[in-house]
């Protein structure tokens, strides 16, 4: 259990921060940018939750918790890629978390009208905020993929971020009256 009795420490006043391993890095380090953008995704989902209830809200709450797991995974580098397991190196995202997203995407998507064009972000307040969360998630994924070219990143982290952006897209359509309230892109309409 984490206990935070003092919020500020002054240890980052010179532009560095501690990773989960205790190592200090610059606040602009790619690893910090990646897990910081995961945190931003989580905050965007929190705003979307202001407009959800029931099953959708419960699913998003679980995802927010998963994103803390994912941030913990990213903030603790390992000497070798620690994919899909939690052990002495710290909390790691698992394939089971990815599979759960896939199963929920499939269940939501079953009720949606197939798309014939791209969807413009918007619709209901919940859907609009989920579209924003989706784009922030895509940025987190790009940063994590870049980090993976330089350092070890668990494969499940990359898969989870990739599926999560799909999940947020599909849920936005579901919350737009199963896609009936989606606004579709009409290429060249305003030339």
Image (cartoon, rainbow, N blue to C red):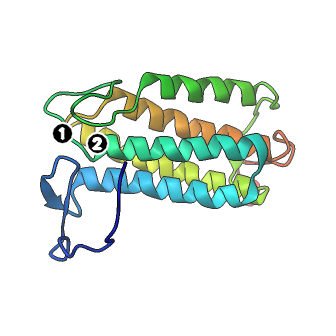
Q: Give the numbered dot on residue 51.
A: none
| For residue 131, side relative to residue 79 (left or right) | right
Q: Is residue 43 above or below residue 34?
A: below
Q: Nearer the viewer, residue 26 or 1?
A: 1
Query: Is residue 118 in view?
Result: no
Task: Assign a secondary structure to mark 2.
Answer: helix
Query: Is residue 64 in view?
Result: yes
The quarter of the image holding the C terminus is bottom right
Q: Nearer the viewer, residue 66 or 139?
A: 66
Q: Nearer the viewer, residue 191 or 136?
A: 136
Mark 1 nearby-residue class (10 Å; few <14, some 14–19, many ≥20): few
Q: Is residue 55 above or below residue 46?
A: above
Q: Position of residue 5 (x, y in %)?
A: 34, 68
Q: CA distance from mark 2 to mark 1?
A: 7 Å
Q: Nearer the viewer, residue 179 or 184?
A: 179
Task: Assign a secondary structure to mark 1.
Answer: loop
Q: What is the quadrant of residue 116 in the picture? A: top right
The residue located at (57%, 26%) in the rendering is 100
The residue located at (80%, 31%) in the rendering is 112
The residue located at (37%, 48%) in the rendering is 1
Q: Position of residue 90 (x, y in %)?
A: 27, 37
| For residue 185, side relative to residue 33 (left or right) | right
Q: CB under 8 Å between callouts 2 and 1?
A: yes
The total number of labels drawn is 2
Q: Position of residue 66 (x, y in %)?
A: 48, 40
Mark 2 nearby-residue class (10 Å; few <14, some 14–19, many ≥20): some
What residue did someone put label 2 on? 146
What residue did someone put label 1 on? 150
The residue located at (15%, 52%) in the rendering is 22
Q: Position of residue 135 (x, y in %)?
A: 53, 51
Q: What is the quadrant of residue 115 in the picture? A: top right
| For residue 63, side relative to residue 34 (left or right) | right
């Amino acid at each position: 259990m984490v206990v935070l009795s003092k919020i500020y420490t002054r240890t980052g006043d010179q532009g560095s921060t501690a990773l989960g391993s205790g190592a200090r890095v610059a606040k602009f380090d790619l690893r910090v940018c990646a897990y910081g953008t995961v945190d931003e995704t989580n905050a965007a989902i929190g705003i979307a939750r202001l407009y959800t209830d029931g099953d959708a809200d419960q699913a998003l709450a679980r995802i927010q918790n998963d994103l803390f797991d994912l941030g913990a995974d990213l903030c603790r580098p390992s000497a070798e890629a620690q994919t899909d397991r939690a052990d002495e190196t710290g909390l790691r995202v698992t394939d089971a978390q990815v599979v759960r997203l896939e199963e929920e995407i499939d269940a939501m998507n079953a009720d949606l009208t197939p798309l014939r064009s791209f969807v413009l972000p918007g619709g209901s307040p919940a859907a609009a905020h989920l579209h924003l969360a989706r784009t922030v998630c895509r940025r987190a994924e790009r940063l994590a993929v870049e980090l993976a070219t330089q350092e070890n990143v668990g494969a499940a982290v990359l898969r989870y971020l990739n599926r999560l952006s799909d999940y947020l897209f599909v849920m936005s359509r579901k919350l737009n009256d199963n896609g009936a309230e989606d606004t579709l892109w009409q290429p060249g309409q305003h030339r």
